[in-house]
Image: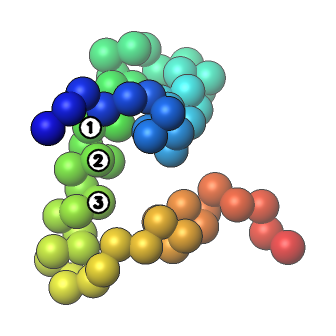
């Protein structure tokens, strides 16, 4: 498996940057991001749900 390029991780980058703008340090922001990246597939497996990025990122979209 090749190295992941940052262009593929735009959601991860946005999550990290949001944490940093809230005043969270680099290490803590990475830890939170890691927890999220592990928690997402764990939640899908636990609930027997197929991952849907539109649902996963729905809270980031402005309400219409």
Q: Secondary structure at mark 3?
A: helix
Q: Is residue 48 visible?
A: yes
Q: Position of residue 63 (x, y in %)?
A: 79, 69
List the residue tagged with mark 3.
40
**Tag 3 and tag 2, C-beta contact below 8 Å:** yes
The Cα–Cα distance between marks 3 and 2, rounded to whole angstroms, is 6 Å
Rendered image quadrant of residue 46: bottom left
Q: Secondary structure at mark 2?
A: helix
Rendered image quadrant of residue 22: top right
Q: Is residue 15 visible?
A: no
Count of marks placed on residues = 3
Residue at 77% across / 61% down in the picture? 62
Which class describes the residues within 10 Å of circle 2: few (<14), some (14-19), or many (20+)? few
Rendered image quadrant of residue 3: top left
Q: Position of residue 35 (x, y in %)?
A: 25, 43
Which class describes the residues within 10 Å of circle 3: few (<14), some (14-19), or many (20+)? few
List the residue tagged with mark 2.
37
Q: Indicate the quadrant containing the C terminus: top left, top right, bottom left or bottom right.
A: bottom right
Residue at 21% across / 50% down in the picture? 38
């Amino acid at each position: 498996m090749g190295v992941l390029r940052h262009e593929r991780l735009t959601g991860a980058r946005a999550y990290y940057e949001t944490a940093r703008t809230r005043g969270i340090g680099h290490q803590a922001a990475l830890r939170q991001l890691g927890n999220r990246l592990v928690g997402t597939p764990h939640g899908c497996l636990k609930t027997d749900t197929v991952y849907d990025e539109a649902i996963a990122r729905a809270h980031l979209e402005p309400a219409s």
